[in-house]
């Protein structure tokens, strides 16, 4: 488990530390705010994070519910992740790649087919 430190630049003493699990949790919550999308289940939850000097890189794999505009949903995910991570941790998000790996048919749609 990685531990990331941020030292305040405004002369205050002390430091703030985040482990990668905290950032993963923030991203999971950010994705859950978007209607019509679901992170892939499992231990890794369809999420890979890379911490680099220029910011955080995130690869997010999701399923989109049938009937939703895929590019629009992917863009909303990118916006939500960037906003939430930067607001809650003060880290910069360098890049968010969204991989749509499937379309989830809702029960009522599947019955019509």
Image: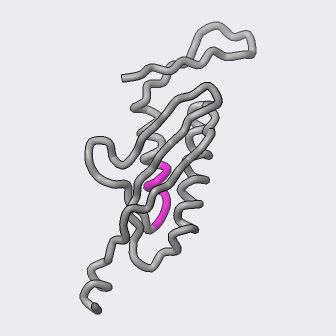
Quarter of the picture holding the C terminus: bottom left
- Left or right of 110, for residue 94: right
Direction from residue 9 to residue 88 in the image, left or right: left
Tell me what residue is drawn at x 67 percent, y 16 percent. 8
Residue sitting nearer the eye, 74 or 34: 74
Where 103 sits versus 50, above or below?
below
Q: At which x and y percent is residue 103?
A: 37, 71
Quarter of the view holding residue 21:
top left
Percent across and percent down for residue 89 are: 57, 31
Task: Tell which of 72 and 54 is nearer to you.
Answer: 54
Q: Is residue 51 magenta?
A: no
Can you say whether 78 is above or below 8 in the image?
below
Question: Relative to 20, is 76 above or below?
Answer: below
Q: Percent position (x, y) of residue 101?
A: 38, 62
Q: Which residues are magenta?
A: 30-35
User: Can residue 31 be found in the magenta stretch?
Assistant: yes
Residue sticking out furthest to the right: 10
Relative depth, front residue between 96 and 107: 96
Give the residue at x 64% y 34%: 92
User: In which image quadrant can residue 47 be found?
Assistant: top left
Q: At 40% from the left edge and 58% from the top edge, which residue is drawn?
A: 62
């Amino acid at each position: 488990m990685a531990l990331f430190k941020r030292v305040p630049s405004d002369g205050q003493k002390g430091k703030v530390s985040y482990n990668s699990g905290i950032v993963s949790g923030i991203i999971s919550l950010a994705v859950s705010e978007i209607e019509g999308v679901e992170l892939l289940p499992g231990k890794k939850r369809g999420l890979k994070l890379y911490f680099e000097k220029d910011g955080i890189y995130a690869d997010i794999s999701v399923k989109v519910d049938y009937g939703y505009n895929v590019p629009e949903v992917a863009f909303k995910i990118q916006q939500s992740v960037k906003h939430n991570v930067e607001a809650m941790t003060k880290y910069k998000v360098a890049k968010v790649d969204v991989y749509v790996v499937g379309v989830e048919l809702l029960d009522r749609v599947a019955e019509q087919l």
